Amino acid sequence: MVNIIENKAKIKGTIKDIEKTSSMQGYCELRVKLDKSENVEGYPNLAKADEGSVILITMHSEEIAMRNLEEGKSFHAIVKKVFGQKYFVDSFSK
């Protein structure tokens, strides 16, 4: 059993590529080069350890299209780390 720690981080990075997931219909994984993470008040920042690495962020395909996200663009969001270097978006930031 994996212990889950409630966490959040405000991240900045660059989208390396976007691929549909085989395990979650309607979702894609963004490979993002994580340049920087900042603390979100009241939560541990588990993304700090992944700075400089490429992380996987799972997002709904419609959200990706709506936000016009594509390879090479900047990515700014508040994320939650699930395990390893996998994340989900909590909210978008400027």
Image: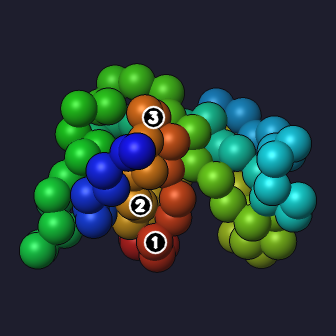
Which residue is the site of mark 3?
A: 85
- Residue 73: in sight, yes or no? no
Instruction: State the SS at label 2.
Output: strand
> Residue 79 has which mark?
2
- Residue 25's spot in the image, x, y percent? 88, 59
- Residue 12's spot in the image, x, y percent? 38, 49
Cα–Cα span, label 1 and label 3: 16 Å
Cα–Cα span, label 2 and label 1: 5 Å
Tag 2: residue type? Val
Which mark's residue is nearer the viewer, 3 or 2?
3
Q: How many labels were placed on the picture?
A: 3
Q: Residue furthest front?
A: 1
Which residue is the site of mark 1?
A: 90
Tag 3: residue type? Gln
Instruction: State the SS at label 1.
Output: strand
Q: Is residue 92 above or below residue 59?
A: below
**Residue at left offset 67%, top offset 60%:** 59
**Residue at left offset 62%, top offset 35%:** 31
- Residue 7's spot in the image, x, y percent? 27, 62
> Residue 78 has which mark?
none
Q: Is residue 64 above or below residue 33?
A: below
